[in-house]
Image: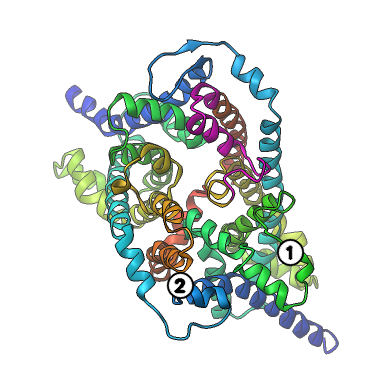
Amino acid sequence: MIKRKPLYILNKTWINAIFWILMLLIIYPLFWMIMNSLKTSTELFINSFALPEKPLFQNYVDAWNMGFADFFLNSILVTVSSVAVTVLLSAFCAYALARLDIKFKNLILYLIIGGLLLSPQSALISLYKIFDALNIYNTYFAMIVPYIAFRIPFAVFLMYGYFKDFPGDLEDAARIDGCSTLKIFLKIVMPISKPIIAATAIVSSIFTWNEFIFALVFIESEELVTIPVGLSRFRDALQTNWTGMMAGIILASLPMIIAFIFMSKSFIRGLTAGSVKG
Amino acid sequence: MNKKKYFNYLYVLPAILFVLVFVYFPIIMNFYNSLFRMTSYSDVKTYVGFKHYVKMFNDPIFYTAIKNNFLYAGFSILFQVGLGMVLAILLEGRFIGKKTGTFFRNTLFIPSIISIPAVALLWYFIYNPQIGLLNGILDVVGLDQLKTAWLANPKTAIYSVIMMSQWQYMGYIMVLLIVSIQKIPKELYESAVIDGANEFQKAIYITIPSIKSMLAVTTIITFIGSFKLFSEIFIMTGGGPYNTTQVLGTYMYRAAFKFDEMGFGSAVAVVIFAITFLVSILQLKSFKST
């Protein structure tokens, strides 16, 4: 016992040291970027490691005025509307499949959850053609519609499991009191299901807020572009204004990081429940 | 009564329609489109049979692309699942204080919630030959002979992009594994401690076997993720230099939206579909066993 203890302490020290090095690898690049986003271009080129002489917030103002304000509004509009519709339609669908009397339940369930197996990339070109034909190419709908369609399988998958395990007593009591199915769903089931609705909404928001390839291909006008695509076009527009670019990257990432700091538990619950990456 | 039953179908109808029309239908159309020559601005389709597939299988860039996808998958499984597992076990062991542990976990997780374009641009700066962080550090530690234009050098470009993804997603997979380690019943460890097992033996004989199915799931999602790869490459290298960093996603995009060969692009999309679909079926199977 006495012999083993020092070894254990050594392990502990080494392991902590390894993690602090990893922290440095994660945090330092982010810090480096924040620092450079507060410099003038000349300062950046002279020494990218130095602290800014005098923190310069002009880069953020410039980024905001050069289109970021629009990208933000577009991202909020697209994210809020697609997440709201996704959660609502999926909740109805998952509830009916889990609790109501419907034929071909399993078939419908497999059909919807089977959507998880299909990668968005393999639908990209056909969707482009379809949206062109429907005349919604280069409109908000060209993003909102596929975001909803590709998130429903995941949302139904998450919610179905939850509704399935739901105790039936409350519903039975309400039914005896003469409540309609719709009323039971809206007034009793939905309020109790807040945690799963929150988890689904958070995961769908991360996906939608960060989505790139659909937004890149289905949107042409600068005015409709969301943050991720805006950022990538920004680079071509700004060319060598790298400090402004860095301010833009930080502006783009901040909302999700702040949300995570305040709701890290819900984030982790939602993301691990689904185990579906990007 | 009957009317009420029909009403129940209205609950599922909108969701089904969305998925059928905008997920299934385009993917089926994609198979069909791959047999035609077509462009973006006209509705004319010329049937060419399997010509696009023949062309693709004779194109060396296709093989570079698919090789890069596999390379990406290999490194990602090694770093994200392998190293992520080691970190998860260490974080859940008794080595680190609870508060510090949570800080480590959350910090490692943060890169995964930043959008890929933002992370890709950050690393685009890190790899920059003039002002970049990496060359700067190599200078400081006296390894300046290693300095290079990381993303413009055909030898280093693909590995540079790969390392960025490890930075971004290792923490994510680690957290998935932590959650499943936390579900292991404590009694399993208690009896092992009585038998005199040390931390290493506990990890080998209890922790790893208990999270086997989660390891399978994370390996599969990492593999699938590597074949959905697009934004990272598109932003950092655009597939260059000399097509050395093409992956199936950028190869498809290039065909369809740069060269306006939509039918050929669809054939590439079929390959992406086939690989991700087959592996996803494996995922569903291992999900059932979790």
Task: Using the image, determine if residue B207 lies above or below residue A57.
Answer: above
Q: Is residue B130 left or right of residue A228?
A: right
Q: Amino acid at mark 1?
A: Ala
Image location (x, y in percent) of residue A123? 46, 30
Q: Residue at x 51, y 21 (%)?
A: B263
User: In the drawing, what numbered circle is on residue B236?
Assistant: none
Q: Please tell me which residue is depicted at 56% across the width and 26% down the height of the picture.
A: B270
For label 1, the residue is B203
Q: Is residue B192 above or below residue B176?
A: below
Q: Is residue A220 left or right of residue B55?
A: left
Q: Secondary structure at mark 1?
A: helix
Asked whether the residues under the numbered discs 2 and 1 touch, taking CB atoms below 8 Å apart as contact, a structural biologist would say no
Please tell me whether residue B260 belongs to the stretch shown in magenta: yes
Q: Can residue B179 be seen in this snapshot?
A: no
Q: Which residues are magenta?
A: B237-266
Q: Chain of mark 1?
A: B
x, y percentage for residue A118?
Answer: 50, 33
- The x and y percentages for residue A155 are 39, 44
- Please tell me whether mark 2 or mark 1 is closer to you in this view: 2
Dot 2 amino acid type? Ser
Seen from the viewer's position, the closer of residues B187 and B45 is B45
Neighbor class of circle 1 (other Cα within 10 Å; few <14, some 14-19, many 20+) is some
Secondary structure beneath disc 2?
Answer: helix
What mark, if any, has residue A37 been given in the picture? 2
Along the line of sight, the residue nearer the viewer: B130 or A104: B130
Q: Quadrant of the N terminus of chain A?
A: bottom right
Q: Picture coordinates of residue A110 (x, y %)?
A: 46, 30
Give the quarter of the image for residue A254: bottom left
